[in-house]
Amino acid sequence: MSSTDLLLTFNAGSSTVKIGIFAVDGAKARRLGKGVIDFRAEPLLLGLSRGSQTFDMPLKAEVTKDLHDVIDETFRLLADHFDISTTRAAGHRVVHGGDLFTRATMLDDAAIDAVDALTPLAPLHQPQALRFIRALRHLKPHLAQTASFDTAFHATQDDLVRRFAIPRALHDEGVKRYGFHGLSYKFIVGELARKAPHAAKTIVAHLGSGASLCALDQGVSRDCSMGFSTLDGIPMATRPGSLDPGVILHLAGERKQSFKEIEDLLYHRSGLLGVSGISADSRDLLKDARPEARQAIDLFTLRIAGEIGRMTATLGGLDAVVFTAGIGEHQPQIRAGVARRLSWLGLVIDENANAANDVMISTRESRVAAHVIATDEEQIIADEALSILRSG
């Protein structure tokens, strides 16, 4: 590859896509810019940033199931700011790799079919990634495409940790704990090696609209709050986190709710939104004086602290906690709320450092270190794509 080659990344969520634009700089992928399309917005916009410059560019294309027109117009708009003709590959975030994909892979016909076959394990997220993969194939059939999997990072977990207490046959069929947000955790591992190399036993709190925690031992995943699906673990913006299965039986049995009604409740009407009845955004709730808003935040921090306690048992100790993602990186009140509930572990927050979102936010006397580290999933997607291309 020449030094002018570009590499694009597509990080598809349930209603948005983040686009990374990278230059191939020797053996590394160097970010040039980033874009985002929120499919809930009207009118549809491509928000683009390059250095200190930002652009909001309207998209005229209709949003169809195959996204052909949206991708075509997006490439034309990107070409106004980058030499898109030099694009050599596109890397995609794929939420679920099952037990089949434990590392990034080139996307040929067989791999795309295999990714599609895993859709029942991630029915809201997997189809979104596949839409972009197939739309790019239609627009640029000869462009190399790769997939990076959120579940792959957690393949190192012990079989005992991954099991549910259900019949063994179901486990053997794939009903087990997989863990998610693996691309974020992989990036944090790299940052920890530079910023906190002595933190062997670390719990990372990826707190965003989707939220989870991961227990690391020497940078290797040993446990994760999310299990079989992205519904599990701690409360999120609109998802409940851990929930007694009896609640589902009650809704289906006594309340006669349909599968679709229950799915909508669990993915879109629970979490911070459900508890508060006000907003799914923790920023709104932190500014709201109503008791329902306060209770939603308190429940959020209580469950995070409780999960950290559970994972400390998995690790057999704890050296450090890392806060990352949108809430973890930018909301001191949430971090402080979690820390107060972990004082029994010896975690003491430096209020000034926490308010400033410093990298180290614990005091010198704290027995457990606390860090704030920004994550970058697109960088991992780009690095893995480049590695695959260079390996042939």
Image (tube, helix red, strand yellow):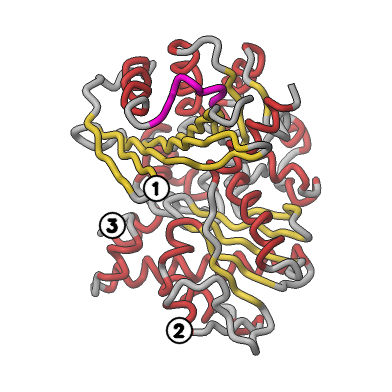
Closer-to-camera residue (191/260): 191
Residue 338 shown left or right of residue 113 in the figure: left
Q: Nearer the viewer, residue 84 or 61?
A: 84
Magenta-drawn segment:
82-90
Mark before the other along the chain sequence, 2 or 1:
1
- The outermost residue toward the bottom is 365
Residue mark closest to the camera, 2 vs 3: 2
Circle 1 is placed at which residue position?
51
Q: Which mark is residue 352?
A: 2
Measured Cα–Cα span from mark 1 to mark 3: 32 Å
Mark 3 lies on a secondary structure that is loop
Image quadrant holding the C terminus, namely top right
- Horizontal and vertical percent position of residue 101: 70, 30
Is 310 located above or below residue 118 in the figure?
below
Considering depth in this image, is 261 or 49 the residue closer to the camera? 49
Q: Is residue 391 left or right of residue 83?
A: right
Q: Which residue is mark 3?
A: 279
Residue type indicated by callout 1: Gly
- The N terminus lies in which quarter of the figure? top right
At label 3, which amino acid type do we have? Answer: Ser
